[in-house]
Amino acid sequence: MFFCLTGVVLDIAAQDLRDSSFIRKYERSNVAEWNMGNYSAKFDFRGFGKRPSSFMLAANTNAYTGLYLNYKWVAVQYSWGIPGTELDRNVHLKHTSFSFRYNRPDMSFIPYYNYYNGLLLQRGKERREYDAFRDMRYYDAGLKFMYFTNTSKYSYKAGSSFAERQLRSAGGLIFAATPQWQRINWVNPSNALIKDSLTYKLLSSDPQWISMTLGAGYNYNFSIRNGRWIISPAVTAMAGALKEVNNDNPLKPVFELQAWMNAGYSGRIFYGYLNAYIQYEQTNLIVKKLNALGNGLSVTVGYRFHSLPKKILGIL
């Protein structure tokens, strides 16, 4: 089961200096959404200066569906896996995800946490059969910060979540920073499935590391029919360094590439869009390279509504 809970969202009012001929807010500020999609996460271990190894772990990912509600300053999302769509239908491995988003016109903060309880090892490149590492756990937590330029004419929210209306086409540079902590915890190590000695040495040593990456990218909102239709592609490239926590090894480089695109209808009451993304990260640990590849495709349909005339519990 895939679980995602997005916590309290603080949308503090501030003086809006944006060009109203390019960006406009919707009168109905609250939304209810339904979404459905699929995602993939793979972890490839390679030697330095060698051909790619055949050792690749994958999360037992599946298709999911879920609901999202944003009312005033509270936002909650819950998603669950669709039975029968797993990579290996005979194995039940869990993925837990938590994120919190705080958006301003010129910046975005996204703390996140991912936990995979169990990973899969594919038997050969062409066969859709897997062996399960039921006691291997992967943790990933961090904070993604993005700063946007040209915010008087370009709205990141208009292209990313269709929360605003981009009346005329515009784009802006993205500057990003991501501090991150990662860990692989193998509870009961065994070399029965891992023939490569260096990979076994790495995974059985309970590796964990912290990293910092910095980078830049670009996002452009193509506005069609005065913002009723939006196509919003974006790309970022980042680089930085990592430090392994449980040893005295020197700093090692980290590289990351991300690309995504949203496209759909942004109406005054109803909206809907497709999202596609791909993310590649190369982490150079002391004995191996860990290449992580994630991608996904989803569809979202939303409804905008007004706030109630009276407060709920005297708070909302």
Image: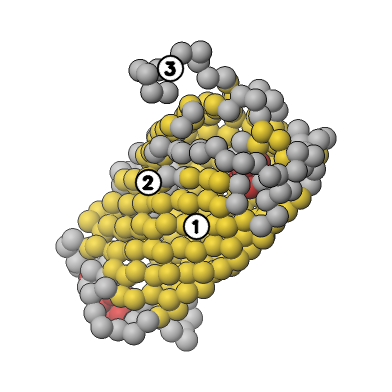
- Mark 3 or mark 2, earlier in chain: 2
Which residue type carries mark 3?
Answer: Lys
Which residue type carries mark 2?
Answer: Ser
Q: Position of residue 177 (x, y in %)?
A: 50, 64
* Gap in angstroms between the C-alphas marked 3 and 2: 31 Å
The secondary structure type at the circle numbered 1 is strand
| Image point (79%, 47%), residue name | 169
Q: Position of residue 311 (x, y in %)?
A: 43, 17
| Image point (48%, 27%), residue name | 71
The secondary structure type at the circle numbered 3 is loop
* Gap in angstroms between the C-alphas marked 1 and 2: 18 Å
Instruction: Classify the position of the C terminus by image quarter.
Output: top left
Judging by the rendered image, the residue that carries numbered circle 3 is 311
Judging by the rendered image, the residue that carries numbered circle 1 is 145
Which residue type carries mark 1?
Answer: Phe
In this rendering, which labeled residue sits more in front, label 3 or label 2?
A: 3
